[in-house]
Image (spheres, rainbow, N blue to C red):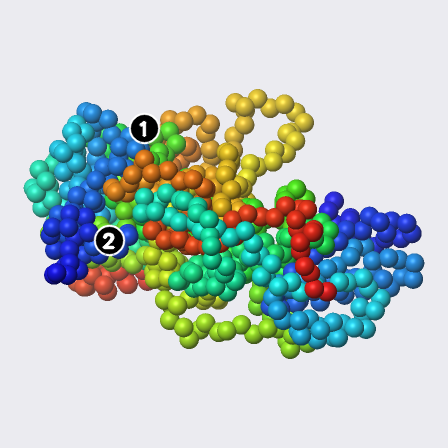
Amino acid sequence: MPSRTPNLCQRCEANKAVMRRPKNLQKLCKECYFHVFETEIHLTIEKEKLFYPGEKVAIGASGGKDSTVLASILKTLNERYNYGVHLVLLSIDEGIVGYRDDSLATVKRNQQQYEMPLEIVSYKDLYNWTMDEIVSCSGVKSSCTYCGVLRRQALDRGAMKLGINHVVTGHNADDMAETVLMNLLRGDTARLESSTNITTKSTGSPIKRSKPFKYCYQKEIVLYAHYKKLDYFSTECTYAPEAFRGTARVLMKNLESVRPSCILDIIYSGEHFKLKQRKKRPGPKKPVTESQETEIRSDGSVSLRNNGNRCEKCGYLSTNKICKACILLQGLELSRAKLNIAAEAVPKVKEDELQHRLQHLSF
Amino acid sequence: MQDEKFKVKFGNSRVERPKVLLPLSYGSSSLALLDMVISHLEEQCQNERAVQGYVLVVLHVGEDTARMERLRKKYSRVLERLEVQFVTVDPAVFVRDLAKVAVTDEYAVHRTENSESLNLQELLLQFDSRSSRQDFWQQVVQEVIFRSAVAHDCSVVIFGHSMSRLAEEILALTVKGRGSETAHRLTDGTMDYVGCSLHVIHPLREVLASEIKEYVRFSGLQEMVATEESVKHKSAKNKTVNELVCEYFETVESEYPEVISTVVKIGTKLDSPQGMAQQCILCQEAVYRDPKTWLEQMSESANKQAQSDVPLCYGCLVNVGVGGGAVWPVSRPSREEILAEYILEE
C-alpha cells in the first residue's frame, strides 16, 4: 500500500502543501491558505459589525505590506460577500525624502490595480512642515512623537475632506500586542484599557478608526502578500523607531520563539485589563456648579467640557482650547531657523547639520 | 490600620496575636525578608514585659531540610527568645484527585477519569515546553503555600517578592494570557481561600532586586542562598517566559531605570474584570470569558456545536495545547480536608 504523501494540504487533502501556517502550524496549499486567511478576516468584520451597506470607507494606505494586503482583501471580500461599501485609498505624505516618496509611488500603482480613488494629504499642506524639516529642527529622537500626533489628525482631516466617517488601518496582531506591552512599560493608564479595542474614536470626532487585522499575525500577512504577489513597499522609515520601542520588539521576538501563541495571549490579557475605580475624595466645601469648573492640564492646556470643541488656532476638533498638534507645532516654530541655506550650495545631509548648528548660534 | 495588628503586645493581649506565614524559597529576597522580620521580632522582645506582636511561621515548599537546619543554627541565639516555627512541606501533597483534561481541535474541553497514578515529577513532565512546566510549578507552590497557611491557622502571608520580581510577574502573566489574574495574585490585600480570609502582603515591593543582593551580602546571608541554575548560556529558545522577561528588565534597567517601578505601579492600579466567573479546572483561577468563544471568532475551522464540559482558563488551555491533554489534580481540598489530611513535617 503506498504511504500517504506527507506533504499534502491538511485541509483539502488534494493539493501539495506549500506552507506551514504560523498561527497553528497547519500544512496548507496556496488556495486553501487564501481561503482560510480571507474567511478569518471576514469573520472578524462580521462579528464586530464593522461596515454597513452604502458606507464610504477610507483605507489608510502607506504602500507597506499591511495596508496593501488590507486594500486587496477588502476589495475581494466586498465583492464576495456584498458588503456594499465604497472603498477609497487615503495616504498621508509626511514629507520624508527617500522613504515616503517611494512608498507613495507604490500606493499610486495600487490605485490602478485595485481601481479605487486615491487621496493624498500632506503634512506640508496641512501644517506647513515636512517631517524632514521637523527632524532637522528637533532631532531624530522625538520624531515618532511628532509624526504620530500629526498623522492621526491628518488621517481624520483627509477623511473629513472626502466626507468619510470611517478609516480602516492595517494594524495587525503584532502591533496590538506590542502596544499592550508598551502601555505597561510606560505606565500609560489612559490607554491601557482601550488599546485592544478594534474600533476607536477620538473624543468629539465623528470619524471612527478600525483595525480588521487585529487578530492577524504579521507573518501571515507577509505570506499572503508573497503568494498573491502583491505590489508593496518594504523599507523601514528613515527615522527608525524610538530606541525604547525597539527593546520591546526584541523581547516580543524572543518570547515568540518560546511561546508562539504569545501575540494572541498578550491581546487576550490586554482585553481583560481593567483599572480600579478611583476613590472619590470629598469634594470642595463650596458647591461649584459644573459650568464654572475648568481643568488646566499639566502641559498648560485647558480642557473644555463639551465634545465638538474647536481648536482656537487651527479650527480642528479638539478637547482642549488648543489641539495637541498646534501645541507641538508652536514649540517647533520657536526653534525654526530664520534663514535657509541654499540647496544648491550644500548637499542635503550637510544642510541639515548646518541648520541645526545655526539654531544654536548667538551673537 | 493593618500595621497595628503587628505591634508589640503587653499583658493579656497575647491571644490577639496574628500568625504570619513567610514562604521561603532560599532565594535572596525571601532570605532578606526573613532576616528583617527576625530582627523586627528581636527588637519587639527587648522590653522585659513585652510580648512579640505576631507569631512567625517560616515555610519552605521543597525537600531541602538541611538548609533549614543551617538557617535555624544561624539564628539560634535570637530564636531562643522568639516564637518562630520552621516548616518544610513536600510539594507532593499537591497530588490528589487526578483526572485527565483534554482539549479538542475545536477548543472544547473534556474531562475523563484517570487510571494512571503519576507523581508530581511525572505530572510536570507531561508538558513539553519548559515555560508551561514552570507555569504549572508556580501554581503548585502557590497552592501549597496557601494550604499550609490554612493548616497552620495563619491569617497573614508575607511574600519576599522584590519590585523587580513583581514587574517580571506582571509582564509574564500578561504574556501567558493571564493578565486578568494580576490584581488577584500580586496586589496586597485580603483574599478568600477555601472559606478562610488570608491577608497577603509583599513588604519588599519598593525594593529592587539589586538592592536586596547587596543587603544579603552585607548581612552575611550569601551562604544560605540556594544558587539557581544560570540561564545566561542557554539559547533564547530554551528559556521560559519568566526568564526572558527577567533578562529584559536587567538589560533595560541601566538605560531606563524607571521602567521597573512604572510596571509595578500600573500593576497595582489593575482590578479584576467584572462579571460572573467560572473556576478553571486546572489552576482554579477565575475564567471571565470562555476561551473557546474567543478563539472561535478568529478561526475558520471553528465548530460551535462542540461543547466543553468543564471550564478551563486561557492560560491553561495554551499550556495543555489544542489537541492535547494532561493529567492533573482537578479540585482543591476543603478547609476540613486540609486540616485533616495535611501531613506537615516539623
Q: Is residue B326 visible?
A: yes
Q: Chain of mark 1?
A: A
Q: From what the image shows, is residue A336 above or below residue B211?
A: above
Instruction: Work out whether residue B258 or residue B180 is closer to the camera in this orientation and state it.
Output: B180
Q: Which mark is residue A206?
A: 1
The residue that appears at 32% across and 36% down in the rendered structure is B304
Check the picture and name the quadrant holding the C terminus of chain B.
bottom right
Q: Amino acid at mark 1?
A: Pro
Question: In the rendered structure, which disc, 2 or 1, sits on the residue that comes first in sequence?
Answer: 2
Check the picture and name the quadrant holding the N terminus of chain B.
top right
The image position of residue A67, as x and y in percent, is: 21, 45
The image position of residue A19, as x and y in percent, is: 18, 56
Instruction: Work out whether residue B259 or residue B324 is closer to the camera in this orientation and state it.
Output: B324
Q: From what the image shows, is residue B185 above or below residue B277?
A: below
Disc 2 and disc 1 in contact, CB within 8 angstroms: no
Q: Which mark is residue A26?
A: 2
Q: Quadrant of residue A284?
A: top right
Q: Which mark is residue A197?
A: none
Q: Are marks 2 and 1 on the same chain?
A: yes
Q: Residues within 10 Å of mark 2 (few under 14, many from 20)?
A: some
Horizontal side of residue B297 vs A89, given as left or right = right
Horizontal side of residue B91 vs A170, given as left or right = right
The residue that appears at 25% across and 30% down in the rendered structure is A51
The residue that appears at 81% across and 55% down in the rendered structure is B53
Give the CA separation, mark 2 to mark 1.
42 Å
Horizontal side of residue A81 vs B264, given as left or right = left
The image position of residue B61, as x and y in percent, is: 62, 63
Instruction: Work out whether residue B270 or residue B261 is closer to the camera in this orientation and state it.
Output: B270
